[in-house]
Protein backbone atom coordinates (compact mmCIF):
# COMPACT_ATOMS: atom_id res chain seq x y z
CA UNK A 1 0.00 0.00 0.00
CA UNK A 2 1.31 3.43 -0.96
CA UNK A 3 2.45 5.67 1.90
CA UNK A 4 2.05 9.42 1.91
CA UNK A 5 4.10 11.94 3.86
CA UNK A 6 2.36 15.18 2.83
CA UNK A 7 -1.37 15.85 2.99
CA UNK A 8 -2.59 18.89 1.07
CA UNK A 9 -5.96 20.49 1.80
CA UNK A 10 -8.00 23.15 0.07
CA UNK A 11 -9.63 25.82 2.25
CA UNK A 12 -12.99 27.01 0.90
CA UNK A 13 -15.79 24.43 1.14
CA UNK A 14 -13.39 21.97 2.73
CA UNK A 15 -12.10 23.43 6.01
CA UNK A 16 -14.58 26.33 5.91
CA UNK A 17 -17.87 27.15 4.21
CA UNK A 18 -17.59 29.65 1.41
CA UNK A 19 -21.04 30.65 0.19
CA UNK A 20 -21.35 34.14 -1.30
CA UNK A 21 -25.12 34.14 -0.83
CA UNK A 22 -24.78 33.23 2.82
CA UNK A 23 -22.08 35.84 3.32
CA UNK A 24 -24.03 38.66 1.69
CA UNK A 25 -27.20 37.76 3.60
CA UNK A 26 -25.39 38.95 6.73
CA UNK A 27 -25.47 42.48 5.29
CA UNK A 28 -29.00 42.74 3.88
CA UNK A 29 -32.26 40.78 3.75
CA UNK A 30 -33.34 42.19 0.40
CA UNK A 31 -33.30 39.35 -2.12
CA UNK A 32 -32.72 41.55 -5.17
CA UNK A 33 -29.85 43.37 -3.45
CA UNK A 34 -28.28 40.07 -2.39
CA UNK A 35 -28.42 38.80 -5.97
CA UNK A 36 -26.88 41.99 -7.37
CA UNK A 37 -24.12 42.11 -4.77
CA UNK A 38 -23.22 38.44 -5.19
CA UNK A 39 -23.14 38.80 -8.97
CA UNK A 40 -21.04 41.93 -9.04
CA UNK A 41 -18.60 41.16 -6.20
CA UNK A 42 -18.07 37.41 -6.21
CA UNK A 43 -18.93 36.27 -9.73
CA UNK A 44 -16.99 38.71 -11.87
CA UNK A 45 -13.39 38.91 -13.03
CA UNK A 46 -12.26 41.16 -10.16
CA UNK A 47 -12.71 38.33 -7.65
CA UNK A 48 -10.55 36.04 -9.77
CA UNK A 49 -7.96 38.78 -10.19
CA UNK A 50 -7.80 39.31 -6.43
CA UNK A 51 -7.19 35.58 -5.98
CA UNK A 52 -4.59 35.73 -8.73
CA UNK A 53 -2.80 38.61 -7.03
CA UNK A 54 -3.02 40.76 -10.14
CA UNK A 55 -5.41 43.42 -8.81
CA UNK A 56 -5.48 45.53 -5.67
CA UNK A 57 -8.56 45.65 -3.48
CA UNK A 58 -8.91 49.37 -4.16
CA UNK A 59 -8.98 48.82 -7.91
CA UNK A 60 -11.49 45.99 -7.50
CA UNK A 61 -13.76 48.21 -5.42
CA UNK A 62 -13.68 50.94 -8.05
CA UNK A 63 -14.67 48.55 -10.82
CA UNK A 64 -17.44 46.89 -8.81
CA UNK A 65 -19.00 50.23 -7.83
CA UNK A 66 -19.16 51.29 -11.48
CA UNK A 67 -21.53 48.41 -12.17
CA UNK A 68 -23.76 48.80 -9.10
CA UNK A 69 -26.54 51.24 -8.39
CA UNK A 70 -25.35 53.96 -6.04
CA UNK A 71 -27.82 52.76 -3.42
CA UNK A 72 -25.70 49.60 -3.03
CA UNK A 73 -22.29 51.29 -2.89
CA UNK A 74 -21.96 51.45 0.90
CA UNK A 75 -23.00 47.81 1.27
CA UNK A 76 -20.65 46.71 -1.48
CA UNK A 77 -17.69 48.44 0.13
CA UNK A 78 -18.53 46.95 3.51
CA UNK A 79 -18.76 43.47 2.03
CA UNK A 80 -15.50 43.76 0.12
CA UNK A 81 -13.68 44.90 3.24
CA UNK A 82 -15.22 42.55 5.82
CA UNK A 83 -16.72 39.51 4.01
CA UNK A 84 -14.36 37.11 5.76
CA UNK A 85 -15.84 38.06 9.14
CA UNK A 86 -18.74 35.81 8.16
CA UNK A 87 -16.91 32.62 7.21
CA UNK A 88 -18.13 29.47 8.95
CA UNK A 89 -15.63 26.91 10.12
CA UNK A 90 -16.56 23.31 9.45
CA UNK A 91 -16.63 21.04 12.51
CA UNK A 92 -14.62 17.84 12.84
CA UNK A 93 -11.65 19.06 10.78
CA UNK A 94 -9.65 20.52 13.68
CA UNK A 95 -9.72 17.17 15.51
CA UNK A 96 -8.81 15.26 12.36
CA UNK A 97 -5.95 17.60 11.53
CA UNK A 98 -4.67 17.47 15.10
CA UNK A 99 -4.58 13.68 14.79
CA UNK A 100 -2.85 13.78 11.40
CA UNK A 101 -0.33 16.27 12.74
CA UNK A 102 0.42 14.02 15.71
CA UNK A 103 0.92 11.10 13.31
CA UNK A 104 3.74 13.02 11.67
CA UNK A 105 2.16 14.06 8.40
CA UNK A 106 3.28 17.29 6.81
CA UNK A 107 0.10 19.35 6.41
CA UNK A 108 -0.05 21.90 3.62
CA UNK A 109 -2.75 24.29 2.43
CA UNK A 110 -3.23 24.97 -1.29
CA UNK A 111 -5.88 27.68 -1.63
CA UNK A 112 -7.11 30.08 -4.27
CA UNK A 113 -7.21 33.12 -2.01
CA UNK A 114 -6.53 36.84 -2.10
CA UNK A 115 -3.92 38.55 0.06
CA UNK A 116 -6.58 39.29 2.70
CA UNK A 117 -6.14 35.62 3.68
CA UNK A 118 -3.50 36.89 6.08
CA UNK A 119 -6.14 39.01 7.82
CA UNK A 120 -8.34 36.06 8.74
CA UNK A 121 -6.19 32.92 8.75
CA UNK A 122 -5.57 33.03 12.50
CA UNK A 123 -9.31 32.83 13.14
CA UNK A 124 -9.57 29.42 11.46
CA UNK A 125 -8.89 26.81 14.11
CA UNK A 126 -7.95 24.07 11.67
CA UNK A 127 -5.08 26.07 10.22
CA UNK A 128 -3.06 25.95 13.43
CA UNK A 129 -1.99 22.42 12.51
CA UNK A 130 -0.58 23.30 9.08
CA UNK A 131 3.13 23.40 8.36
CA UNK A 132 2.79 25.52 5.23
CA UNK A 133 0.09 27.62 3.55
CA UNK A 134 0.27 28.39 -0.16
CA UNK A 135 -2.18 30.91 -1.58
CA UNK A 136 -2.71 31.80 -5.19
CA UNK A 137 -2.34 35.57 -4.76
CA UNK A 138 1.25 35.13 -3.59
CA UNK A 139 2.18 32.74 -6.40
CA UNK A 140 0.21 34.76 -8.96
CA UNK A 141 -1.02 31.36 -10.10
CA UNK A 142 -4.25 29.62 -9.19
CA UNK A 143 -5.71 26.14 -9.30
CA UNK A 144 -6.41 24.31 -11.57
CA UNK A 145 -3.47 25.72 -13.55
CA UNK A 146 -0.85 22.91 -13.56
CA UNK A 147 1.80 25.57 -12.95
CA UNK A 148 0.28 26.20 -9.50
CA UNK A 149 1.05 22.64 -8.41
CA UNK A 150 4.47 22.64 -10.01
CA UNK A 151 5.59 25.91 -8.43
CA UNK A 152 4.08 25.14 -5.02
CA UNK A 153 5.65 21.69 -4.91
CA UNK A 154 9.04 22.99 -6.00
CA UNK A 155 8.88 25.79 -3.44
CA UNK A 156 8.08 23.41 -0.56
CA UNK A 157 10.15 20.51 -1.92
CA UNK A 158 7.10 18.26 -2.08
CA UNK A 159 7.45 15.03 -4.03
CA UNK A 160 4.09 14.69 -5.84
CA UNK A 161 4.25 10.93 -5.49
CA UNK A 162 4.32 11.19 -1.69
CA UNK A 163 1.51 13.76 -1.47
CA UNK A 164 -2.27 13.41 -1.22
CA UNK A 165 -4.61 16.29 -2.08
CA UNK A 166 -8.18 17.07 -0.94
CA UNK A 167 -10.27 19.69 -2.80
CA UNK A 168 -13.96 20.39 -3.40
CA UNK A 169 -13.40 21.29 -7.07
CA UNK A 170 -13.32 18.38 -9.50
CA UNK A 171 -11.26 20.49 -11.92
CA UNK A 172 -8.66 21.08 -9.22
CA UNK A 173 -8.60 17.38 -8.30
CA UNK A 174 -8.15 16.31 -11.91
CA UNK A 175 -5.41 18.86 -12.50
CA UNK A 176 -3.54 17.67 -9.41
CA UNK A 177 -3.87 14.06 -10.56
CA UNK A 178 -2.55 14.97 -14.00
CA UNK A 179 0.45 16.54 -12.28
CA UNK A 180 1.08 13.29 -10.39
CA UNK A 181 -0.56 13.99 -7.03
CA UNK A 182 -3.13 11.47 -5.80
CA UNK A 183 -6.30 13.36 -4.93
CA UNK A 184 -9.77 13.09 -3.44
CA UNK A 185 -12.85 15.08 -4.43
CA UNK A 186 -14.46 16.35 -1.22
CA UNK A 187 -18.22 16.76 -1.56
CA UNK A 188 -18.89 17.88 2.01
CA UNK A 189 -19.32 14.37 3.40
CA UNK A 190 -16.75 14.24 6.20
CA UNK A 191 -17.40 10.57 7.05
CA UNK A 192 -16.73 9.62 3.42
CA UNK A 193 -13.36 11.38 3.62
CA UNK A 194 -12.39 9.65 6.85
CA UNK A 195 -13.47 6.28 5.44
CA UNK A 196 -11.29 6.86 2.39
CA UNK A 197 -8.34 7.87 4.56
CA UNK A 198 -8.75 4.58 6.40
CA UNK A 199 -9.05 2.65 3.14
CA UNK A 200 -5.71 3.96 1.85
CA UNK A 201 -4.01 3.70 5.26
CA UNK A 202 -3.60 7.42 5.94
CA UNK A 203 -5.23 6.80 9.30
Image (cartoon, grey):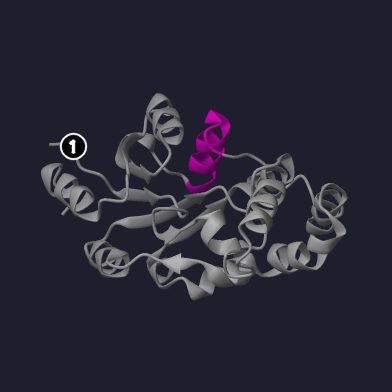
Q: Is residue 95 above or below residue 186?
A: below
Along the horizontal axis of the image, is 105 left or right of 44?
left
Along the horizontal axis of the image, is 117 left or right of 199?
right
Q: Residue at x 27, y 66 (%)?
A: 92
* Magenta residues, dominant SS class: helix
Between 131 and 19, the one nearer to me in the picture: 19
Quadrant that contains the N terminus: top left
Quadrant that contains the C terminus: bottom left
Q: Position of residue 147 (x, y in %)?
A: 57, 31
Q: Position of residue 140 (x, y in %)?
A: 68, 43
Along the horizontal axis of the image, is 84 left or right of 126?
right
**Is residue 60 part of the magenta span, yes or no?**
no
Q: Position of residue 66 (x, y in %)?
A: 87, 49
Q: Residue at x 79, y 48 (%)?
A: 55
Q: Residues within 10 Å of mark 1 (few under 14, many from 20)?
A: few
Which residue is under mark 1? 2
Q: Is residue 51 above or below residue 81?
A: above
How many numbered marks have been drawn onto this rendered protein structure? Answer: 1
Task: Tell me where residue 143 sits by quadrant.
Answer: top right
Q: Position of residue 161 (x, y in %)?
A: 32, 34
Question: What secondary structure is found at the residue carrying circle 1?
Answer: loop
Q: Is residue 180 above or below residue 105?
A: above
**Is residue 147 part of the magenta span, yes or no?**
yes
Between 80 and 1, the one nearer to me in the picture: 80
Q: What is the magenta range?
A: 143-156
Between 181 and 187, the one nearer to me in the picture: 187
Q: Residue at x 42, y 43 (%)?
A: 158
Task: Tell me where residue 115 sits by quadrant.
Answer: bottom right
Task: Tell me where residue 177 sits by quadrant.
Answer: top left
Residue that extends furthest to the top in the rendered view of this protein: 178
Q: Is residue 45 above or below residue 77?
A: above
Amino acid sequence: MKRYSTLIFDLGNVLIDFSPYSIVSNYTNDVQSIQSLVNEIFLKQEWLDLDQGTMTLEDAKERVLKRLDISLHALALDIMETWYDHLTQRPYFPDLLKELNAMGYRLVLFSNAALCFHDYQDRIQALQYFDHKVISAELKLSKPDPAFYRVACEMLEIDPKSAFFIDDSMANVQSAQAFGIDAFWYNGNFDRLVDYFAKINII
